[in-house]
Amino acid sequence: MPLYDIKNISVRINSTNIIRGLSLIIEKGEFVNIIGPSGSGKSTFLRLLNRLSSISSGEINYCGENINEINPVLLRKEVGFVFQKPYLFGETVKENIEYSSNIHNLAVDKDYIFNMLEQLNLERSILEKNCKDLSGGEQQRICLIRTLMLKPRVLLLDEITSSLDPVNTKIVEEFITKIYNDWGITIVLVTHDLQQTKRMGKRTIFLEKGKVLKDAETNSYFKEQSQDQINDFFNEWW
Ligand SMILES: Nc1ncnc2c1ncn2[C@@H]1O[C@H](COP(=O)(O)OP(=O)(O)OP(=O)(O)O)[C@@H](O)[C@H]1O
Ligand SMILES: [Mg+2]
């Protein structure tokens, strides 16, 4: 049974079709890149996968069950989402990281947190810091840890390295790759970074105007085009 079986879905907002007739299957354990021009519906698509947005027509099945029938709180426990812009609430980092365990009445696994902090090159003392005092790169890594606290089966990542410098980008990419390899998790990664596309998901889906334009193995994806054509292609987005 596929993890996601997406059948002919559309999203209409104010009579504009943002997603139009999109069908897709995502299997358990896949690592998929979603690329495409700005406004092509990448974030909207990703948000549908844990019911942060809803479809206007069509059907999304998650593990064989209509996603609209699944309790969103339980769904989001399994399907974690990290936004492009880090969003932290309250005062301390600790408060953010322990939040989801607390609302689900789960014990906070300190060693698990320390391990993730270490892998993401963060000091343990950051837990006591005020969120306001963190750099953008630190905030994004804390958001990632917060999402991973409930050990999700699916990780939805929306341009999470776009505001990070190359050093932080590398740390985050390596961390995600390790999690993917160690956990057998499914990852859907939205990116506009060509090199990241090549480094990350094994499958790459190109969206344009809310539709799948191309869906292929990342290795073979860019082979048909010269490097210059690929660069032009990506540069056109900006
Ligand atoms: N809540 C909304 N109300 C109105 N229009 C919306 C809403 N959400 C998205 N849109 C529009 O839908 C289109 C797709 O938006 P979306 O954010 O999914 O694109 P994207 O591919 O993620 O773009 P980017 O690469 O810039 O992040 C855009 O034209 C956007 O303005
Ligand atoms: Mg987006």
Image: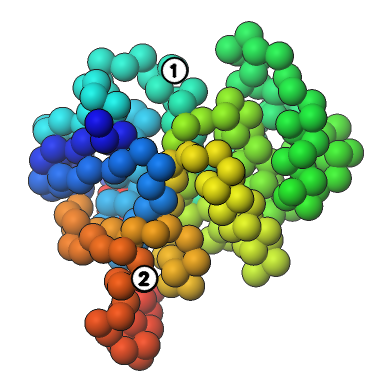
Location of the C terminus (image quadrant): bottom left
Is residue 189 visible to the viewer in this orientation of the structure? yes
- Spot occupied by residue 109 in the image (x, y as percentages of width and height): 74, 23
Which image quadrant for residue 15?
top left
- Spot occupied by residue 216 in the image (x, y as percentages of width and height): 26, 63
Count of labels in the image: 2
x 68%, y 41%: residue = 142
Is residue 232 visible to the viewer in this orientation of the structure? no
Q: CA–CA distance between discs 2 and 1?
A: 36 Å
Which residue, given by chain and number where applicable, does mark 1 sit on?
73
x 70%, y 23%: residue = 98
- Spot occupied by residue 130 in the image (x, y as percentages of width and height): 80, 36
Which residue, given by chain and number where applicable, does mark 2 sit on?
219
| Number of other residues with Cα within 10 Å of mark 2, as a class: few under 14, some 14 to 19, many 20 or more | some
Q: Do the CB atoms of the residues marked 2 and 1 lie less than 8 Å apart?
A: no
> Disc 1 marks which amino acid?
Val
161 in relation to 228, above or below: above
Q: Is residue 151 left or right of residue 18?
A: right
- Spot occupied by residue 150 in the image (x, y as percentages of width and height): 58, 25
SS under mark 1: helix
Q: Which of marks 1 and 2 precedes in the sequence?
A: 1
Location of the N terminus (image quadrant): top left
Q: Is residue 72 left or right of residue 168?
A: left
